[in-house]
Amino acid sequence: MKLSTRTRYGTRALLELALHRSETPVFLKDIAREQEISLPYLEHIIAPLIAGGIIRSTKGPRGGISLARKPQDIRLIEITRLLEGSLAPVECIDNPGVCTRSSACVTRDVWTKMKEGMDEVLESTTLQDLVENHRKKSAAEPSMFYI
């Protein structure tokens, strides 16, 4: 199971906002430049995060984007669901009706445990956890660290 670039880049953009958390919004073009993400693609990624209440957008000459909530209140599972959807490795996990074998399928049990494990990690990890890990890693290897 691989996460799409939407989720990976979206998480990096949110980490960038959390690292530079201030009262002033950040320009999307600055995040795109800093994270080496194309601006049009980043604009596409940001829209569901605004709709989902994770980011707020401010219009005008001093506008930009900022976190709508504190980093410790934003869980990675929220970000992933907004940008990726379900992390179920097979369709029958979320929709057992697609397969007549779902109720008796032993491999489905494995796929269910796999999804539950991923959900558990994402539920227990906040954006603040990423900020703290970033600071630890960048202090240990300042010349080699990327977000």
Image (cartoon, grey):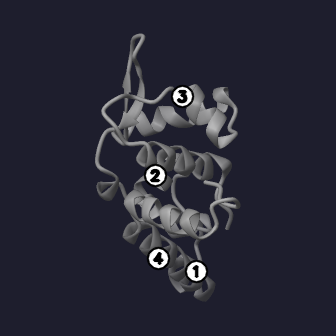
Which amino acid type corresponds to the residue marked 4 in the rendered image? Glu
Label 4 – label 3 distance at C-alpha: 34 Å
SS of the residue under disc 4: helix
Q: Is residue 130 above or below residue 105?
A: above
Q: Sequence-wise, which precedes: disc 2 or disc 4?
A: 2
Label 1 – label 4 distance at C-alpha: 12 Å
Horizontal and vertical percent position of residue 25: 39, 28
**Nearer to us in this view, 72 or 143:** 143
* Tag 4 residue: 116
Residue 104 found in image quarter: bottom right
Query: In the rendered structure, are the residues bearing label 2 and label 1 in contact, judged by CB atoms less than 8 Å apart?
Result: no
Label 3 – label 2 distance at C-alpha: 18 Å
Label annotation for residue 28: 3
Q: Sequence-wise, which precedes: disc 1 or disc 4?
A: 1
Q: Nearer the viewer, mark 1 or mark 4?
A: 4
Query: In the rendered structure, are the residues bearing label 2 and label 4 in contact, judged by CB atoms less than 8 Å apart?
Result: no
Q: Sequence-wise, which precedes: disc 2 or disc 1?
A: 2
Horizontal and vertical percent position of residue 144: 70, 61
Q: Is residue 2 above or below residue 68?
A: below
Which amino acid type corresponds to the residue marked 3 in the rendered image? Leu
**Nearer to us in this view, 82 or 64:** 64
Mark 3, other Cα within 10 Å: few <14 / some 14–19 / many ≥20: many
Query: In the rendered structure, are the residues bearing label 3 and label 2 in contact, judged by CB atoms less than 8 Å apart?
Result: no
Query: In the rendered structure, are the residues bearing label 1 and label 3 in contact, judged by CB atoms less than 8 Å apart?
Result: no
Which amino acid type corresponds to the residue marked 1 in the rendered image? Arg
Label annotation for residue 108: 1
Mark 2, other Cα within 10 Å: few <14 / some 14–19 / many ≥20: many
* Tag 2 residue: 79
Q: Nearer the viewer, mark 3 or mark 2?
A: 3
SS of the residue under disc 2: helix
Q: Kindly give the residue lying farthest to the bottom in the view shown.
A: 106
Residue drawn at 58 percent across, 85 percent down:
110
